[in-house]
């Protein structure tokens, strides 16, 4: 997939997401960079969490993350977008998702950043398993909206 | 309508991968089959998959798709539980 915004950064990684990630998208025309740093909490529904594991439908997740970035450019007066999600085992306090949006003026970056994390949690195929002292569970998630069924879907053609 | 068979690549994720016992398989279906037919076929050998059907969304070639979407040979179909990234 090609993007009209060549400076955007969309990534899935099994490595640590660096603290400096927000600086990398900043350019001379920017007056603001809004960031969201999602990190691993030490508790879930009253139980002490030991660690998390994330997995993804990687090719689709990257496509959906890119769609979110494209949507941000269409909706907000922003310059650059970075969306990075980590996969594999994450310890308490580590960053699981990092989003940064740059813009000339702060409101667009702040609004776009909020929109991006909300959209990611609803539509990007990534799954989190929570490990506790006495077992593990897949986290409750959100079912992404699917296209409505049509009474007469088009027959297979090609 | 032709009744030739087509091969579909199926992917399972999250808890569904654990229930199905695999992350990926190839399934042969009659021409004209839809995503819901594919799921029924997959659940034949693993009846425990059926109870997850109401809480799944399907993806065809990395795009969310309705259950009555027609399949084409070589399609990649993912069965996705509720997503929990972030």
Image: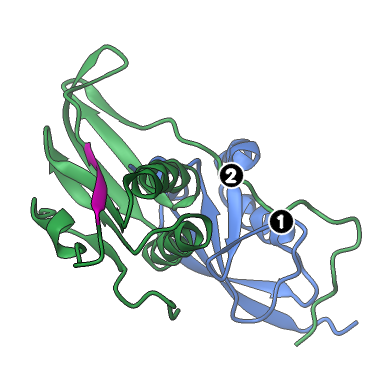
Chain colours: A green, B blue
Task: Give the number of marks.
Answer: 2
Q: Are marks 1 and 2 in contact (CB under 8 Å)?
A: no
User: The residue tagged with tag 2: helix, strand or loop?
Assistant: loop
Q: Is residue A103 left or right of residue B42?
A: left
Residue A15 visible? The answer is: no
Q: Chain of mark 2?
A: B
Residue A95, image quadrant: top left
**Which residue is identified by label 1?**
B66
Q: Is residue A148 left or right of residue B44?
A: right
Residue at the image point whose x is 74% and y is 64% from the top: B69
User: The residue tagged with tag 1: helix, strand or loop?
Assistant: loop
Q: Nearer the viewer, residue A92 or B43?
A: A92
For residue A35, above or below residue B67: above
**Which residue is identified by label 2?**
B56
Chief secondary structure of the magenta span? strand
Residue at the image point whose x is 77% and y is 58% from the top: B68
Residue A46 percent across, percent down from the top left? 27, 11
Give the foreground label among 1 and 2: 1
Residue at the image point whose x is 85% and y is 64% from the top: A153
Is A68 a magenta residue?
Answer: no
Residue A23 percent across, percent down from the top left? 13, 58
Quadrant including the N terminus of chain A: bottom left
For residue A93, above or below residue A98: above
Residue A61, image quadrant: bottom left
Write the start and end of the magenta stretch as one range. A31-38
For residue A56, above or below residue A135: below
Is A34 a magenta residue?
Answer: yes
Residue B28 visible? The answer is: yes
């Amino acid at each position: 997939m090609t993007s009209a915004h060549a400076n955007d950064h969309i990534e899935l990684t099994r490595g640590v997401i660096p603290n400096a990630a927000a600086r990398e998208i900043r350019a001379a025309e920017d007056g603001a960079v809004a960031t969201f740093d999602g990190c691993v909490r030490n508790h879930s529904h009253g139980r002490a969490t030991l660690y998390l594991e994330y997995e993804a439908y990687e090719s689709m997740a990257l496509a959906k993350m890119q769609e979110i970035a494209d949507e941000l450019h269409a909706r907000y007066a922003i310059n650059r977008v970075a969306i990075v999600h980590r996969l594999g085992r994450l310890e308490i306090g580590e960053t699981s998702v990092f989003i940064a949006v740059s813009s000339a003026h702060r409101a667009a970056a702040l609004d776009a950043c909020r929109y991006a994390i909300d959209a990611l949690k609803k539509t990007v195929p990534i799954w989190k398993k929570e490990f506790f002292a006495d077992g593990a569970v897949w986290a409750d998630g959100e079912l992404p909206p699917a296209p409505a069924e049509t009474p007469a879907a088009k027959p297979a053609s090609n | 309508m032709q009744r030739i068979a087509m091969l579909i690549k199926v992917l399972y994720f999250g808890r569904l991968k654990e229930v199905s016992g695999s992350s990926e398989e190839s399934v042969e279906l009659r021409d004209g089959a839809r995503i819901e037919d594919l799921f029924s076929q997959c659940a034949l050998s693993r009846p425990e998959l059926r109870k997850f059907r109401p809480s799944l969304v399907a993806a065809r070639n990395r795009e969310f798709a309705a259950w009555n979407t027609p399949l084409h040979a070589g399609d990649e179909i993912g069965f996705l539980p509720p997503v929990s990234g972030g």
